[in-house]
């Protein structure tokens, strides 16, 4: 393990359908906003308050691996593609991890985006 993850982030996004989750995952990975997106195939049962009313929904969790400098553009793309009025977009820091994996993650988003511009 190495403490090299200061630029690496995990983003959590919930989607109402598996189809929507797959569409978002494909788009953000192909545009190099995320290095990888895992979709948890079993739906989660979510309870939340929306517009003053208790709601219940089945949702699919997307776990996105990205770099800090991609967050703003990634959030904009998720908001653009998502069907929810206020999609979940929660960012968690990666504080430690495999040096090779974190290097791959960083190269997959940061360096590839620089070359494309």
Image: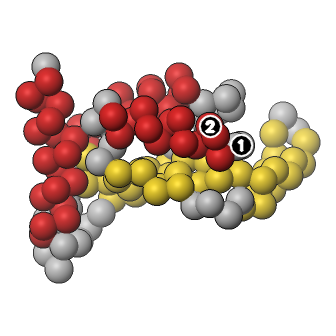
> Is there CB contact under 8 Å for labels 1 and 2?
yes
Q: Quadrant of residue 88?
A: top right
Q: Is residue 44 left or right of residue 116?
A: right
Q: Residues within 10 Å of mark 1 (few under 14, many from 20)?
A: some
Disc 2 marks which residue? 20
Q: Nearer the viewer, mark 1 or mark 2?
A: 2
* Residue 71 seen anywhere in this rendered image of the structure: no
Residue 61 image-quadrant placement = bottom right
- The single residue placed furthest to the top in the displayed view is 117
Say which element carries label 1: loop
Looking at the rendering, which quadrant does residue 21 occupy?
top right
Q: Is residue 70 above or below residue 106?
A: above
- Please say whether residue 70 is visible from this viewpoint: yes
Q: Give x and y (percent) for residue 51.
A: 84, 34
Residue 113 on image: x %, y %: 17, 31
Residue depicted at x 68% and y 64%? 42
Q: With 82 as the anchor, is 103 left or right in this view?
A: left
| Residue at position x 54%, y 42% in the image | 22
Taking depth in this image into account, of 3 and 42 the one nearest to the observer is 42
Q: Which residue is painted at 23% across and 72% down in the image?
A: 97
Q: Quadrant of the N terminus?
A: bottom left
Of residues 109 and 46, the one nearer the viewer is: 109
Residue assigned mark 1:
16
Residue drawn at point x = 62 percent, y = 60 percent? 41
Callout 2 environment at 10 Å: few (<14), some (14 to 19), or many (20+)?
some
How many discs appear?
Answer: 2
Left or right: residue 83 compared with residue 38: right
């Amino acid at each position: 393990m190495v403490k090299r993850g200061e630029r690496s982030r995990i983003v959590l996004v919930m989607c109402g359908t598996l189809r929507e989750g797959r569409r978002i995952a494909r788009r953000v990975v192909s545009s190099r906003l995320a290095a990888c997106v895992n979709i948890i195939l079993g739906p989660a049962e979510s309870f939340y308050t929306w517009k003053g009313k208790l709601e219940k929904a089945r949702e699919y969790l997307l776990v996105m691996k990205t770099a800090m400098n991609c967050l703003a553009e990634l959030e904009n793309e998720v908001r653009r593609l998502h069907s929810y009025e206020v999609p979940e977009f929660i960012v968690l820091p990666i504080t430690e991890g495999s040096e090779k994996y974190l290097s791959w993650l960083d190269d997959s988003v940061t360096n590839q985006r620089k070359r494309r511009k």
